[in-house]
Image (cartoon, grey):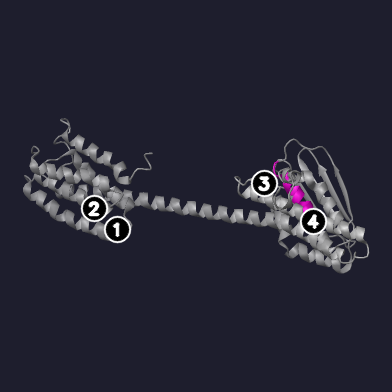
Amino acid sequence: MWRRLDVTLRDLPLGVLFLVASFLPGLRGHGTQVGDLPTRPFDALAVVALALECLSPVVRRRWPVVCLALAACGFALDQLCGYHSAAGTALPVALISAGSHLERLRRTTAAVLSVAYVPLAVALARLGSGGETATEFVTFYLTLALAWRAGAWLRSTRAAEAARRERVAADTRTAERTRIAAELHDVVTHHVTAMVVQAEAARYLTAAPERLERSLTAVSDTGRLALTDLRHLLDLLKPAHDTDHGTDHGLGPTEATQARTPAAGRVLTLVEQTRRAGQPVDFTEWGPQPASTGGADLVAYRVVQEALTNALKYAHGSRTSVQVQRGETEITVEVSTDGTGSRAATATAAAGGGRGLAGLRERVDVLGGDFSAGSDPDGGFTVRARIPADGTS
């Protein structure tokens, strides 16, 4: 609630503090003193000086120049009349505030104050008994300059912190956009590729109604999975996203529940989907399921997903082998596709220029694992990944 108040109200207690301190018996006449003018008791003119000095902190953040002008005028009146009140401390406070909050005409303000200090020092020297020296006035000026520089340092520190936060925010936004792009690529590319392959195959099955129906059913199922994965991605981007309406767009409760299950648990479903698209896939998975693998399960799933997508796109119909080995400390994934001639060359080009495998390499590297993708001596193409289960190498 305090931070929601206007800055003027929040600074008001500081001005009240200076006013109360000026009337305390132990502090009266024992405030800031420049020169050797004798201390005189408060009178009507003292009220004006105190009002100027005590009002200045109230507007120090809203109007820093006004604050500095009020404090300077009140301090000059306080010293020339010899009140030497505790409210004179408002001047260095005003200098610190102005140096910290003043955005424009900083050098001009500093120059005007420096010039104005000269006649004040001359007047105090003439009104005094002559016991003060020039060194005293110079020392006091340097003290005020130090207060101004302290405010400038606070301003530069605050600006540097704001710039640092902006850089961190920009880096975070960039990293988040990259992550979202990678997720969209992994989710959309695989399902759409499978749908395209299945739809192309359906064109040649008009003479076999049963096979045509199975092919179109596969297209429909793949589209449902794509919508399910996209909804799951939306849930990740927006935690408040309502997943209870998972029956929309043709999604049933089972599919909506599946979207919230760990990705690696659906590797077999992914393999079956690829098989329905016409890609012969041999799937082998062995080893115990660790109690907790962090992000390794999702990365392993994405490796299999991207490798099968490339197999559908560049080596459709070639036999593909998927091997997933789970250990206590790591998950090993190997996906190899048979191929010869131009198809293997096309796959190699895709590995070098596409964002899919490059994104997988980054994912695996983040977890401290190893990733490789390249052509085999027999003309095939193999993707291998070793993913630490605890995210450390």
Q: Which residue is mark 4?
A: 220
Rounded to the nearest angstrom, the CA distance separating label 1 from label 4 is 69 Å
What is the number of the mark on residue 66? 2
The amino acid type of the residue labelled 1 equals: Arg
Foreground of the two, 74 or 119: 74
Residue 211: image quadrant is bottom right
User: Outermost residue, top direction?
Assistant: 26
The amino acid type of the residue labelled 3 equals: His
Callout 4 secondary element: helix
| Circles 1, 3 touching at the beta carbon (< 8 Å) | no
Foreground of the two, 312 or 161: 312
The magenta segment is: 294-305
In this rendering, the answer to whether 59 lies above or below 211 is: above
What is the number of the mark on residue 106? 1
x%, y% of residue 39?
9, 39
As for residue 289 lying within the magenta part, the answer is no
Q: Which residue is mark 3?
A: 245
